[in-house]
Image (cartoon, rainbow, N blue to C red):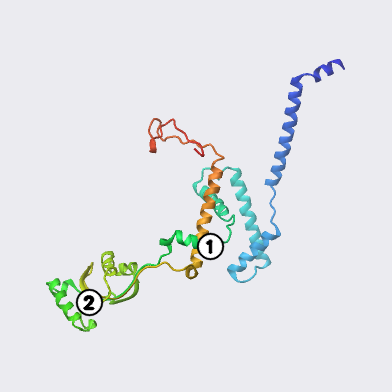
């Protein structure tokens, strides 16, 4: 008994006993985890989702055989997924990493943003006036002169302009063209799609009134009469409330996602090494430099 007491007082024995207990606890926990990873449960809710997805696609509920096939396909997906993860096939895969990032970003965006009231939306509208301002609009007619049909385009344009200013019918003048002869309430972008940016800018800067020209596009010479020009304006909140709220909520979700990322990033120590030792990285960071999150 004396030697047992002496042995029991030995620190080495205590160390070995503690190690054995920790090993048994670790083995037990791993065994439990192993059971979980080898167990697949297809819940009633998942079966209902599979059935509902089938019904949305085929506009009828699945038969018993079709539902069994859907469940078996779900189980197949789960088996292959778990085996692929166990083999490490998800590691160092760019596409998998992107998909996981997108799913997490989606979850972070969906954390919930409070619905704004009119006071918040009005302040947002005033802070982003240029985003919601309507474009200037112009109504005009144009008469086209084909450069291939006139040896002296400038002279032909002056003569035709004089006729138009004297009251001649614009439909009876000019050369045939597939270009639109008349625009109503067109934005500068609308005009540019047909005639080019330079022509659109000239028309947008022309005051309403009589015939003027010549104006040039890539197609040739034009004589133009602007009948109406509506300047851009900032609509009231009541007119564009849905648009303002949509953009406000989108901005809030983006800010929320960025804030969540910053908080997650602070939990990591980040070291950036140069591709070639000794080279200087962008911004003047040398090969020995490393950065930590939050710095």
Where residue 188 appears, x then y in whole percent? Answer: 32, 67
Where residue 270 appears, x then y in whole percent? Answer: 51, 37
Residue at coordinates 46% horizontally, 36% vertically from top-left? 272
Where residue 70 appears, x then y in whole percent? Answer: 63, 61
* Side of 200 where 86 appears, left or right: right
Q: What mark, if any, has residue 40 been given in the picture?
A: none
Name the quadrant containing residue 48.
bottom right
Q: What mark, if any, has residue 211 been given in the picture?
A: 2
Q: Is residue 212 visible?
A: yes
Say which of 228 and 14 sits in front: 228
* Side of 279 where 167 appears, left or right: left
Vertical placement of 89 versus 200: above or below?
above
* Side of 94 where 5 appears, left or right: right
Q: Is residue 96 visible?
A: no
Say which of 103 and 60 sits in front: 103
Name the quadrant containing residue 117.
bottom right
| Residue to which mark 1 is pinned | 119
In the current view of this chain or complex, which residue is farthest to the right?
A: 1
Where residue 173 appears, x then y in whole percent? Answer: 20, 81
């Amino acid at each position: 008994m004396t030697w047992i007491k002496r042995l029991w007082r030995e620190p080495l024995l205590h160390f070995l006993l503690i190690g054995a207990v920790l090993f048994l606890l670790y083995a037990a926990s791993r065994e439990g985890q192993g059971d979980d990873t080898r167990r697949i449960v297809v819940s009633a809710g998942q079966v209902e989702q599979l059935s509902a997805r089938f019904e949305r696609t085929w506009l009828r509920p699945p038969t018993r055989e079709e539902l069994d096939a859907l469940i078996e396909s779900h189980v197949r997906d789960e088996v292959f997924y778990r085996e692929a993860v166990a083999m490490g096939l998800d590691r160092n895969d760019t596409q998998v990493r992107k998909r996981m990032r997108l799913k997490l970003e989606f979850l972070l965006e969906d954390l919930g943003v409070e619905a704004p009231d009119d006071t918040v939306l009005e302040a947002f509208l005033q802070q982003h006036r240029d985003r919601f301002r309507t474009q200037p609009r112009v109504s005009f007619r144009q008469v086209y002169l084909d450069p291939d049909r006139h040896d002296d385009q400038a002279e032909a344009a002056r003569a035709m302009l004089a006729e138009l200013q004297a009251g001649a019918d614009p439909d009876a003048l000019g050369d045939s063209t597939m270009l639109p002869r008349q625009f109503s309430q067109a934005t500068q972008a609308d005009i540019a799609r047909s005639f080019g940016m330079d022509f659109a800018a000239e028309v947008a800067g022309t005051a309403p009134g009589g015939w003027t020209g010549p104006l040039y596009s890539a197609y040739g010479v034009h004589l133009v009469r602007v009948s109406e020009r509506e300047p851009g304006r900032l609509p009231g909140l009541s007119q564009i409330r849905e648009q303002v709220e949509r953009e406000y909520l989108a901005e809030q979700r983006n800010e929320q996602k960025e804030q969540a990322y910053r908080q997650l990033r602070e939990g990591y120590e980040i070291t950036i090494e140069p591709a070639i030792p000794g080279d200087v990285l962008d911004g003047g960071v040398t090969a020995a430099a490393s950065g930590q999150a939050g710095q």
